Image: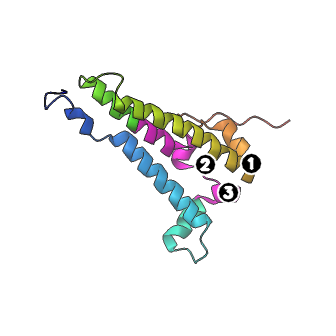
């Protein structure tokens, strides 16, 4: 029979503010961009201001500003980081390294790797200019953008 001390997994319910906040911010930025891009109604004054700020991204057809300047999929990265952190908290609290939590985190990472590549392929087929963004911006791990290569 499995028994444990009540404090053994105390830290597993700890919120993950950096990853949750990052995912929320990236999702909000993407939602705002897509809402303005696909709006069929007149934009609100706030959306008009935001559309002006997103003018370059709207012209290209995909978002590359905000968190998307540092990662093409910051929301995917943050989601994976949250679940990996969750499984590591279990290990740090004395749980086994190989557990349901770590197996779940590993499966989510694999799932996200596949869906990220699938999403990249769809975006590239719809928008050939996406290759320029791929050349300068990390796919998942947030990092400083690389300089664009000069055209010959």
Residue 88 placement (x, y as % from top left): 34, 28
Which mark is on residue 61?
3
Q: Main secondary structure of the magenta part?
A: helix
Q: Is residue 89 above or below residue 38?
A: above
**112 sits left or right of 130 in the view:** left
Which mark is on residue 33?
none
**20 sits left or right of 11 in the view:** right
Q: Is residue 80 magenta?
A: yes
Which mark is on residue 129?
1
Residue density around tag 3, few if under 14, some if 14–19, many if 20 or more, within 10 Å: some
Q: Quadrant of the C terminus?
A: top right
Q: Distance from label 2 to label 1 (Cα)?
A: 12 Å
> What is the number of callouts on the image?
3
Q: Helix, strand, or loop for circle 1?
A: loop
- Residue found at x 39% / y 41%: 19
- Which region shows up in magenta? 54-82
Q: Distance from label 3 to label 2 (Cα)?
A: 10 Å
- Whether residue 38 is visible: yes
Which mark is on residue 64?
2
Q: Please report whichever mark, 2 or 1, sits nearer to the chain's N-terminal start.
A: 2
| Furthest-bottom residue in this view | 42
Q: Is residue 115 above or below residue 98?
A: below
Q: Is residue 29 above or below residue 2?
A: below
Q: Is residue 122 magenta?
A: no
Residue 90 placement (x, y as % from top left): 28, 29
- Whether residue 142 is visible: no
Circles 1, 3 touching at the beta carbon (< 8 Å): yes
**16 sits left or right of 144 in the view:** left
- Residue found at x 60% / y 35%: 138
């Amino acid at each position: 029979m499995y028994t444990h001390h009540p404090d053994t997994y105390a830290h597993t319910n700890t919120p993950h503010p950096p990853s949750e906040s990052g995912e929320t911010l990236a999702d909000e930025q993407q939602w705002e961009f897509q809402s303005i891009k696909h709006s069929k109604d007149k934009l609100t004054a706030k959306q008009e201001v935001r559309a002006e700020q997103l003018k370059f991204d709207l012209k290209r057809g995909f978002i590359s500003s905000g968190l998307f300047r540092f990662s093409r999929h910051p929301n995917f990265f943050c989601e994976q980081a949250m679940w990996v952190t969750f499984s590591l908290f279990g290990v740090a609290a004395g749980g086994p390294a190989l557990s349901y939590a770590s197996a779940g985190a590993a499966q989510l990472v694999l799932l996200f790797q596949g869906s990220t590549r699938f999403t990249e392929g769809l975006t590239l087929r719809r928008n050939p200019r996406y290759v320029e963004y791929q050349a300068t911006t990390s796919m998942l791990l947030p990092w400083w953008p690389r300089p664009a290569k000069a055209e010959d």
